[in-house]
Structure formats: structure tokens, C-alpha cells
Amino acid sequence: MRMAFKGTGLTLAAVLFLAACEAAGSLAGGGAQSDYLVARQALETGNYDLAIRRYGRLMQAVDATRASRLQLEYAHALLRGDRYEDAIAAADTLIESRDGAIRASALAVRGTARHEAARRQLAEGAATAATRALLEGARDDLAAFLAGHGTLDAGGSMRARAALITADLASLG
């Protein structure tokens, strides 16, 4: 009887160990599919640092020119992780090389990242020519997004952000 308890205890410890591995960002099987599933789940649940790491690892492992959706999700993770300059750079590549909904979504990401970077500068009291350039770029990005693919903004969040950008530009004088 005592021996059965030891075996059960070891089994329970092993199960808890494996569960802890999954919570830390590993899934059974590993590899690119596992990394993608972990990255996507992390992005959706707000664990942006983990999402950025996993998407970054995937971006190194695949041909980024063929993985537009992956690159877009990576740019979005960077945006949500407050890494605005990196998000802008990641979206730039898609904007220059893609068309259609991928390009439009990259415009929305880049426009949002530019706006958030400018708002950070405004909050720090550092309204400079660079701040104005970020706001004007954000305005242009969102205008292009809305003109070409406004139906992707069903909830109106990009239209609302465009209005905020206009107000932020007006506040600069």
C-alpha cells in the first residue's frame, strides 16, 4: 500500500512538472507549430513578452517573405508590447512588399504604433518635430487603411484613432 502511494506521488509530481512546462510556454511536440500556438495564445492573452519571443524565433526559422500573416502577428505583438519602433519597422516590410488585406492591416499596425510612440513623447513633454512627423505618418497610414479597406474596421477603432490623431496634431498648433 505504501509503495502504491509513492508511485502515485511520483506520477503526480511528473504531471505537475509537465503542466508547469506548458504554462511557461512549451507544448508537447515542440517545433514551429508549437511555437506558433504558444505565440498566438500569448498574444491573445496579453503575455506580449512571450509572444514577441516566440514570434521572433519563428521569424528566424521561416522565410519571412512567404509568411506575411506571421510577420503581421509579430508586428502586432511588438505594438501591444509597447515596442513601437520595432512594430513600425516590422510593419514597414509588409507595407512595401504586400498588397490587399495584409498591407492594409500592416498600415493599421504601423499607424497605431506611430500614434502610440507620439503619445508617449507628448506624455513626457517632448513635443518635437519628430513627434509631429510620427502623428502625420500615423494620420496618413490610417487614412490609407480606411480608404482602401475601411470594411476591416467594423468596430470603428481605427476611425476613432484617426480622430484622436487629428486632435493630437491640433494640440501641437
Image (spheres, helix red, strand yellow):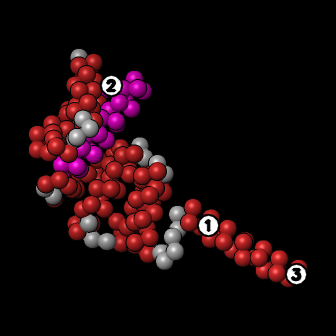
Position of residue 163 measured from the top left corner of the image (x, y, whole percent): 23, 26
Q: Nearer the viewer, residue 132 or 109?
A: 109
Front position among marks 2 and 3: 3
Q: Is residue 16 left or right of residue 30?
A: right
Q: Nearer the viewer, residue 140 or 18?
A: 18
Local secondary structure at mark 1: helix
Q: Residues within 10 Å of mark 2 (few under 14, many from 20)?
A: some
Please give the name of the residue rendered at 82% of the width and 81% of the height, measured from the top-left corner: 4
* Residue 113 on the magenta segment: yes
Q: Residues within 10 Å of mark 3 (few under 14, many from 20)?
A: few
- Residue that numbered label 3 is attached to: 1
Local secondary structure at mark 2: loop
- Residue that numbered label 2 is attached to: 127
Please give the name of the residue rendered at 34% of the width and 36% of the height, measured from the top-left corner: 116
Q: CA distance from mark 2 to mark 3?
A: 74 Å
Pointer 1 with pointer 2, Cβ within 8 A: no
Whether residue 148 is visible here, answered yes or no, is: yes
Amino acid type assigned to the residue bearing label 3 in the image: Met
Q: Is residue 168 left or right of residue 30?
A: left
Amino acid type assigned to the residue bearing label 2 in the image: Ala
Amino acid type assigned to the residue bearing label 1 in the image: Ala
Of labels 2 and 3, earlier in sequence is 3
- Residue that numbered label 1 is attached to: 19
Q: CA distance from mark 3 to mark 1?
A: 27 Å
Please give the name of the residue rendered at 31% of the width and 71% of the height, measured from the top-left corner: 62
Q: Which residues are magenta?
A: 103-129
Front position among marks 1 and 2: 1
Q: Nearer the viewer, residue 83 or 28?
A: 28
The N terminus lies in quadrant:
bottom right
